[in-house]
Image (cartoon, rainbow, N blue to C red):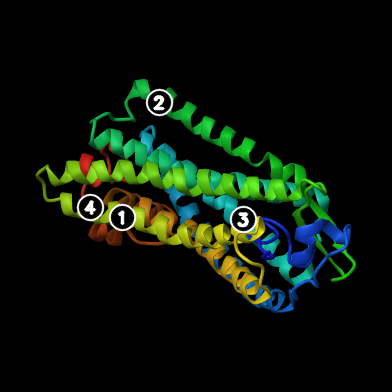
Amino acid sequence: MSLTDLDMNFSLFGYDLDMMNSSDLDYGYNGSTCCSAPPCSSSPTQAFAGSFLPPFYILIFLLGLWGNAMVIAVLLRAKEALPGTDVFIFNLALADVLLVVTLPFWAAQEVHGWIFGNFLCKLVGSIFKINFYASIFFLVCISIDRFLAIVHVIRMYNRNKTSLIVFISLAVWALCFLLALPDFIFLMAEFDSRQNTTSCSLSFPVGSAKAWKIGLNFKNLVLAFLLPLVIMSYCYTHIILTLLLSKGFQKHKALRVILAVVAAFFLCWSPYHLVHFINTLIELGVLERDCELEEKVDIAGMITTNLGFFHCCLNPLLYAFVSIKFQNRFLELLGHLGCVSHKFLKRYTRGSTHRKDSTWSGSTEASYAGI
């Protein structure tokens, strides 16, 4: 079986490369049961991980932190109460920030091993997993909000809907916390004498490890990809049909944004889940074990996992920077910080920034440009 696991990214999403080999995954950890076949060498995959992961983690950390922090700063500076869509965008940006701030820990692990202790292993890993789910679930909330606002003309930012928006947001965070409980329970910082390093990785009880792995794999596949993709596709398909039957010059711009939203989610996450689905088939014995194949799956798992992480960097562009209203508020924030002059603001600020519409909307035709 492949050394990668479906849960996060090697040590984040499953078992660390330094902690075991493929035969360990078959017959129990740390060689507790004699293996019937020699293990596959993990050296090529470890070498690739050591050179590829740290710089990519740091790049995503810097881009994701900057972009999402700007979204949070702009939304917090708003003088009026945030509309429903903006509340979801705020939570989405917060989830993405909390997700990317864990990446330096995993970058350090690839270089020095896990040096932060067992408690931080559980805490950082759980925070990562909570926000991994939250980032995706709030995309779904935004999709449903746009579906209601455009197809059914139900504005989620009405005063009587404020408590509902808050309740939904809290419910999403509570659900993500529950889904991350297995990580908090099973994540451990363990020393591997063979590799002479300590790694933070999931360590399931011997005898039930395979069942836990397969169960978590399918949980991630269904809850973090298939179900969100179905809901988003349903919402945006009906939104597109509604816009095609409507009139207005903003229609075509809105359609482009919709397609960008769905395409970004699909392109960033489908390769990841495809690779780890293949990994699960190897685990179940559907695909014959082969060291060369498993090495390729390992490397593909690293690349596609980081492609999924990169979606955190795209979210600010897709959900905020496409909005004229958000661009105006961002320029006003820069002016408040003294980064740009008043003359610059007057020249490049467009339209009105005082509408009650969502920051993501910011158009004279809010129902359409709010995509």
Q: Which residue is mark 2?
A: 162
Residue drawn at 41 percent across, 47 percent down: 229
Precedes in sequence: disc 2 or disc 3? 3
CA–CA distance in space, label 4 to label 2: 28 Å
Determine whether label 2 and label 1 are within 8 Å by CB: no
Q: Residues within 10 Å of mark 2 (few under 14, many from 20)?
A: some
In front of the other: label 4 or label 2? Answer: 4
Kindly identify which residue carries mark 3.
Answer: 6
- Ranked by sequence position, the earlier of labels 4 and 2 is 2
Which residue: 28% across, 38% down?
357
Q: Secondary structure at mark 1?
A: loop
Disc 2 to disc 3, how far (Cα)?
37 Å
Q: Amino acid at mark 3?
A: Leu
Quarter occupied by residue 346: bottom left
The numbered disc on residue 322 is: 1
* Spatial CA span between label 1 and label 4: 12 Å
- Where residue 287 appears, as percent x and y from the top left, is 60, 63
User: Is residue 363 at all visible to an observer of this figure?
Assistant: no
User: Which residue is tagged 4?
Assistant: 255
Residue type, label 2: Thr
